[in-house]
Amino acid sequence: LTSVGSDLSVTENQTIELLVMNSLKSVGGLMDVSSNPSLNSLHMTKLNSVSGKMTIHSHALLNDLKLSSLDTVGGDIKMYENLVLLTLDLATLTVVLGEIELYMNVNLTSVDLANLLSVGGDLYVKNHDSLITVDLSSITLIKDELWIRKNASLIEVEIPNLEKVGGDMDIDKNPALL
């Protein structure tokens, strides 16, 4: 399977532990992988684009997420309540036409969006107990709001090339950030 012309949904499967779709290159609509309580590995290493929203949430055991070719998302990215996920490596991602919302991934320690250039909506990174670093080193434009807040362990945020935030910019309530 190299492409899905419309939506891809993998939800509420009680026993699925491993989801490997390493030949998949594009999803023509939304991609929703959510509420799979036994899922511990999600590999889509050749996925380059999702035309709609991409949602990955509510996984108690997901600790291995590989989206190593993802370049463009035409809608929002929402990733939350992935309770044992340690790293979010989206270093190949360059453009998100919607918003990015990352929250309550309680064991997440790093977010790598190093090649992300622009976000067409809000960018939220919030409520992560273990998050230490956020790499947004290439981003130049956030069309709406930037919120990096309530990340108890956050010590590093890289945004050296940011030129414009169209709405509010709040980097607050991160007690370890100096």
Image (cartoon, rainbow, N blue to C red):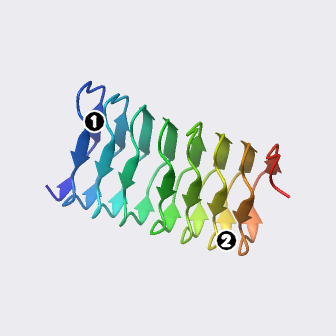
Q: Amino acid at mark 1?
A: Val
**In this view, which residue lies farthest toward the right?**
178
The mark closer to the camera, 1 or 2, is 1
Q: Amino acid at mark 2?
A: Thr
Report the residue at 63% width, 69% height from top. Answer: 139
| x and y percentages locating residue 164 in the rendered image | 75, 66
Q: Looking at the picture, tell me which residue is in the foreground, 15 or 122.
A: 15
**Residue 41 visible in the shown view:** yes
Residue 26 lies in quadrant: bottom left
Q: Is residue 42 left or right of residue 138?
A: left
| x and y percentages locating residue 64 in the rendered image | 37, 50
SS at circle 2: loop
SS at circle 1: strand
Q: Which residue is mark 2?
A: 140
| x and y percentages locating residue 122 in the rendered image | 65, 49
Report the residue at 75% width, 71% height from top. Answer: 163
**In the picture, which quadrant includes the C terminus?**
bottom right
Assess disc 1: are there few (<14), some (14-19) or many (≥20) residues with their C-alpha within 10 Å of its C-alpha: some
Report the residue at 64% width, 49% height from top. Answer: 131
Q: Which residue is mark 1?
A: 10
| x and y percentages locating residue 107 in the rendered image | 56, 42
